[in-house]
Amino acid sequence: MKTDREIWENFKSGDKSALSYVYFQNFHAMFQYGKRLKDEPEFIKDCIQDVFFKLIQAGENLSSTENIRFYLFKALKNSILKELEKIRKVEVVELIPLKFEARFSLEEELSEKENASNKEIALLKALNGLSNRQREIIYLRFECGMQYNQICDIMQLKNDSARKLVFRAVKQLREIIGDQLQIPILFLIQFSNKHVF
Amino acid sequence: MDKKYLKYSIEDFTQDIKFINWVHKGDGHKDWEDFINQNPIMSKDIKLARKIVSALRFSPEDIDEVDTYEIYKNIDLFYNICHKSKRTVRIRRFLRYAALFVMIFSIGAAIPYLYFTHSKVHFSEITDSSLRIGDAKLITASGHELLLTNSQSDLRFNKSGDQLEIDQDSIISLDSEINQMAELVVPYGKRSKIQLSDGTNVWLNAGSSLVFPQKFKGKERKVFLKGEAYFEVSKNKDIPFVVGADQMNINVHGTKFNVNNYESENNLEVVLVEGVVGLKETNFLNLFSKEIVMSPNQKAVYNKTDKLTNIESNIDVNYYTSWTNGLLEFNKESIITVFDKLSRFYNVQFITDDQVEIYKKISGKLDLKESLEVVMIVISDAAPITFRINEEKVFVNSKTNLLPMR
């Protein structure tokens, strides 16, 4: 198994198999992340393509990295911001800050449930109350397995504030879920291959 | 199992990547079960932590596999273009050596021919497509490509030509002993200023390329230009400065002037601001063609097809050089010419209807630091047109029906 660093060096030197490896290993994850930042699939696809164009062009001038996915997420976010800024200039609209607006699966399920218990309603309320920022950190940490310092880098947060924000979210949920354990476990624990990137 | 988990709180577990992977994907399931069996006291906390992690899942977004491959196809194509252009540079460099050998072995008859092809050999493949994409770049004498990511880059060589300062921050050491030429390529939508090792300043406009030696050697200082550039040549009586522009050499004697030599245009245009320059055709009758000497505030237009030069006096030189300050001036020019210039500056394509070009000529000044949208609004104020910008295309239509009949 090659390390990310080695694969990245091959990528930089213009190795085509490294290019296709990096692309197919990361395209889905980049799309998943990008679409949650800006819910316009075609736009996100363009941005991803653009990221790869720029990386190919830069070649040996790219800096090295120990974590390719982190590098690509950061590049994608920059690309999205840049493209939105271009659109803003052309259409003369206010810049809408990027918001991670995705909803949790459980949030969707509970909001559609008709005869929800008091506890479920409390849980839904707590989930609804999580900020976009908390959602983004949880996404990057839980779904993508990123380090907190990388998350802070991508989201331009101060050191350790990502960890604190997750801690706060978890604590709130703990109080509700921990209270007598009434939630049906069935739909909480889902093993789904779809989540595996 | 790591001993550290014995001290973990619920919050710690929920943030541990190994733990999350167990909850999400079932990774290391047996290890975790063993851990709970060995430490039953942890069982309650772990159960709760599992529930919290499970509550914080996102449902996956759908994407069509076809898209994944479609986008890869584009990326693959782009990869091929990038790597192909590098290859042509190498081939062209080889050709230059080949030309050298031919010259040595068959001196007499070959000279006029070699001289004629001389300027063509130096340029790397500057096709329309390579000028349309990406950043400006400097190809050094040793063949390395430096990408210039700013839209207006500022380069400066030191006197010995072995150090290059980029955008007044980074300094790069170069090998100046190589006798290859270096090349600065500025694609559409970009501009660049470069100070050569002799102190000459050159402003390169969008869609242009300058080939020059990192260190000047020999009896003349010769550079080659495609596209448009403004030169402020440092004085040196003993070593004349020569700009090769396709079929014309511009011989300079310490001076400021603008050269417009886009391939898409049939005219080569030289505007002299200060000093003296002489123009000389570089065809194989070179030795016999006479030099046309220009004086300040003159404009020479050389027609590439009929090979005739026309000199215009008392022109407003600011009009031709204002682009170096990010301004575009035009004076009684057809709107199509204006669009042509804008398309290079903003790297967009103009699509006009037949009626647009019949309008009388327009005059004015545009600030190219403004967005294309703003610039187009200014033009549509002055001329009876409507426009729509769609990504890299600008559609321009005439407001014919609003005009009184002539």
Image (cartoon, rainbow, N blue to C red):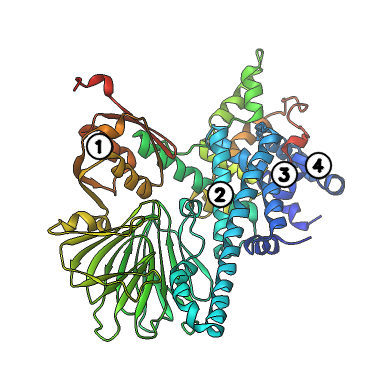
Residue A51 circle label: 2
Dot 4 corresponds to which residue? B26
Q: Residue furthest left?
A: B314
Q: Are marks 3 and 4 in contact (CB under 8 Å)?
A: no
Label 1, secondary structure: give it: helix
Residue A7 circle label: none
Taking the image as shown, residue B384 lies to the left or right of residue B126, namely left
Q: Say whether mark 2 and mark 4 are on the same chain.
A: no
Q: Say whether mark 4 and mark 1 are on the same chain.
A: yes
**Subunit of mark 4?**
B
Q: Nearer the viewer, mark 3 or mark 2?
A: 2
**Subunit of mark 1?**
B
* Depth check, front residue: B223 or A162: B223
Q: CA distance from mark 3 to mark 2?
A: 29 Å
Asked if A187 appears above or below B120 in the picture, the reply is: above
Dot 1 corresponds to which residue? B379
For badge 2, the amino acid type reads: Val
Q: Say whether mark 1 and mark 2 are on the same chain.
A: no
Decide: few, some or many residues near mark 1? Use Cα within 10 Å; few <14, some 14-19, many ≥20: many
